[in-house]
Image (tube, coloured by chain):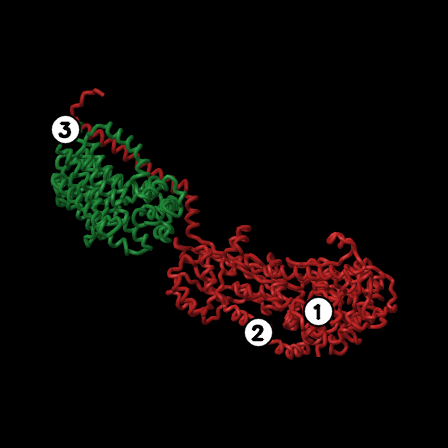
Chain colours: A green, B red
Amino acid sequence: MSARDYIPKPISQLPWLIILLTLAIGCFDLLVLYSAAGGSVSPWAKSQGIRFFVFLLGAIGLSRVPASAFGKAALPAYGVLVVLLVLVELIGAVRGGGQRWLDLGIIRLQPSELMKLAIVLAVAKFYDGLPASETRRFSAIWPAAALILLPAALVMKQPDLGTALMIMASGITVMFLAGVPLRLFIGGALAVGVAVPFAVNFVLHGYQRNRILVFLDPESDPLGIGYHISQSKIAIGSGGIFGKGFLNGTQSHLDYLPEGHTDFALATMMEEWGLVGGVLLILAFFAIIYWGMNVAQHAESRFARLTAAGLATTLFFYVSINMAMVMGLAPVVGVPLPLISFGGSAQMTVMLCLGVLMSIDRQNRKTVRW
Amino acid sequence: MSRPPRIVTEATQTYSFSRRALMLGAAQGGVALLLAGRMTWLAIAENAHYSLLSESNRVNMTLVPPRRGWIVDRHGAPIANNRTDFRVDLIPDLLEDKEKILGELQRLLSLPPEEMARIAADLKHAAGFQPVQVADNLDWDRFAAVSVHLPELPGVAPTRGFARSYPAGAAVAHLTGYVGAASAEQYIKTKDPLLLVPGFKLGKDGLEKMLENQLRGRPGAKRVEVTARGKLVRELATRPDTPGQTTRLTIDAGLQEYTARRLGTNSGSAVVIDCLTGEMLAMVSMPAYDPNSFSDGISHLEWKMLSDNDHVPLMNKVLQGLYPPGSTVKPMNGLALLAAGVDPGMRVNCSGALRVGNGVFHCHKKRGHGPLDLKNAIMQSCDIYFYEMARRVGYDAIAPVARAMGLGQKFDLPFASQRYGTVPDPAWKLRKYKEQWTVADSLNASIGQGYVLANPLQLAVMASRLASGKDLHPSILAGRAPAPNDLPISAEHFAVVRDAMFGVVNGGGTGGAARMQIPGVALAGKTGTAQVRRISMAERSSGVLKNASLPFKLRDHALFIGFAPADKPRYATAIVLEHGGHTVRNLDTPGIGRDIMTYLFDRDKAMATLAELEPTWGGDIQTRMAAEATAYRAAANAPPPAVAVQTELNATAPTEAPAVNAATAADVSTAESVAHTNAAGNSIAADGTTERDQ
């Protein structure tokens, strides 16, 4: 007799470990946001908390959807998001200045954020429909490249370098996993290496270029853009092993740390919770990512495999780009930390990711136990 | 590249996926380790470094300016102290709508347009975070008015601090100097952060400047927690300031103020010295600026008014003014003649003129004094007697005595800008003019004209040495007076000369107006007149012009030295009135000398005299200065100042101002050119009496 026998099957079959990990991260985030607001649930912790539980329930609901349904929805969803991206661009053009979101009343939806998810599904769907023998042909490459470049270009134009890069990275990851010849990636990496200095000088916007130059030498501009990186490093470094204690962070409470509740929430957290908090968070995230990769390994269909691995990698990109940026290992490109940074779109995207992963996982368990 | 294309099947594809996913997973794990490693590095290895940075972010140390040490007089009465100051500053960085806020402040504080212009100019030069003073020295009502409206006035900072205060105002201006905000150069030189603290002021001139080190004290500090925007969260710790040392002077504050007031509308200076110690009891130069308003920073208009004034209020005439001492050297001459073996009873006949070589030297008394001995020559201030005697003994016999009495001597006093004058002799003339000494030079020098120049302090020292027979050194810091030694001059000679000086005042001499009205206390003295222009033969034949009919700058200087009590000297004084010309009796030197001395023995009597006189001069010093300022402003049609004067004052201390240099240079060049041309034959009148323009 095990406890499982008393619990209804749909509930006992849920991936409780992942849900609990997500819950742990989400609740921890509420503490961080509560402290970031100077010990207050408004303006951040409360709305983030409500959204978190709504989206978590949504993700659990999503896990009941058969994985094949995502395959059918992949390309239409991709198409809708491309249209929304164009729409955002048009509204932005009318209002003047870059705009990234559509106001849906409840949340301000950033189509580019959801596109990180949709691109994985779309590219996976494309390779799913491609006969295995075609994989090493040119016809296996250009449609996927087009799928990736179109939204990436639209997002780049917003301008949102971080998201554009993530869309490209997620899409390319799926291409890589689909079996596109390795030399293309090696060649591509070399080409990027050559193109980056060129892009920095001619393609990027002034502020994007600055961020990269300042990343290379943060002290050159301690009160300008380098200020973000310096202050974030000060917050993390001054936290030490155990942190300054809950509600005791000075960098965040005295406004030295900019964006302490959004992109730089990790620094806010680590100032008060120290290295212990940071390492636990990394462990939690990579446990989820590891689980995602494992789900991919056990998936039956090619689409499910590619989607699961692609989504796990998307999560990985979120976490690692944000952490690298906050700790001064990468330029400040505006990628939020999933489940920690305040903001509805990213929260929704991450929860959708988890929902789809759980759905594939559920499908796997019907056949394979692990 | 002619490799045959690899055949891909479902099976190989699944295998390839597994392999590639494993690769990807490994890469992700590697990144996870890298991130954890970076975290560890920042939080452990760099922890100390970043903790420090975090602390220095959070904690802001602000210096609290030290309270400045008081300057007190010999009895402990304050000459310079600190008063609570309500002030309003502007923080340029926080200013939102500049025009609106300045307008509002002008209304609340009722600021004059020239102040508004100064504020605007200051704002233009100010570095964003450094406060610009709007107004200080505010009364409580106006300060409160601003404080109440504070929410509508972003960038306006009402603060409470200490401000330097000089209770006697202009009367002590040239004694204390004044304080002001540090200049940019001073900050660059010292890098002392204290200099940037708003409200901190340091000595700019006079004693305030020279005694800066002991008056300044050590600043306190306030550690406060601030936000990134500089908003104060809470005070962490406060270290109180260490006030500067109180510095005691030898000055008698009451006498100092009385003397300043008694000088009236004159452009003049007076020194009083204690005949026992050499301590200076008063050192007054009038007119002067008000050090209180100087310490607040004055407007361009005020500065221009002070610079333009022909009474040179910016100059410390006591130490910077050089004047031909005129007949005041005659008692000293007497000592020299006695030392040279002249019999005090020997008579010289004064016929009103003396021909020496091809020149004619005149006495101030046109018809002559008749036969005179030394005592009467001093009493009547006869020029011919001294011409004749100087011709006989030569100026070489007189110059050393002049130096022994303090003329040309440098005194070690805490004042930056001093001028020491000249006691000429043949070697000096050869050096300066490449010319031989002539008899005419001796004659001119013998009546304190020609090349002889002295400052009023030296004259006072001469008076004190004549009175005491000791080599007194003037001192101004209490307890620093060096013990005096007897001068190498015989007591009998001193007695002869003092007797003559008693006669000047009390025996029908030229200084009768200086006779004191206190029983048992007599004043001994000597009057003097220093001519600042040549008198031509034509003018002399038609009658020398009266001073009253001459323009101010051409009138004679009026001088007086004296001591009291005559029989047991205690106090010595010297008074020099620029271009006084002995024109108005109650403003002339003997009367002033008498009243200053009277103050020392009978304060009430002296005050009564002053109370009678002051209204006839247009009120006390403050009233007259205010009236002058109003008149000047009206005449200048009050144009708004172009530049803030705080910068101007930062550059120049008043006693180093261009106007002062011009004035002192003019004095000396006039005196020397008169001397130089007179060698050709025209002599100078030296007169000691008040002209009577009945």
Q: Do pointers 1 and 2 mark residues of a single chain?
A: yes
Q: Secondary structure at mark 3?
A: helix
Across and down, in percent, residue B544 comes to: 73, 71
Quickly name the residue at label 3.
Answer: A132
Residue B623: mark in rendering: 2
Q: Nearer the viewer, residue B270 or A177?
A: B270
Q: Secondary structure at mark 2?
A: helix
The amino acid marked with disc number 2 is Thr
Across and down, in percent, residue A316 comes to: 26, 39
Across and down, in percent, residue A55 comes to: 19, 48
The amino acid marked with disc number 3 is Ala
Q: Nearer the viewer, mark 3 or mark 1?
A: 1
The Cα–Cα distance between marks 3 and 2, rounded to whole angstroms, is 108 Å
Taking B694 as reference, is A323 left or right?
A: left
- Quadrant for residue B233, please give it: bottom left
Q: Secondary structure at mark 1?
A: strand
Q: Nearer the viewer, mark 1 or mark 2?
A: 1
Q: Nearer the viewer, residue B47 or A119?
A: A119
Crowd class of label 3 (few under 14; some 14 to 19; many from 20; radius 10 Å): many
The chain ID associated with circle 3 is A
Residue B567 is at least partly visible in this image: no
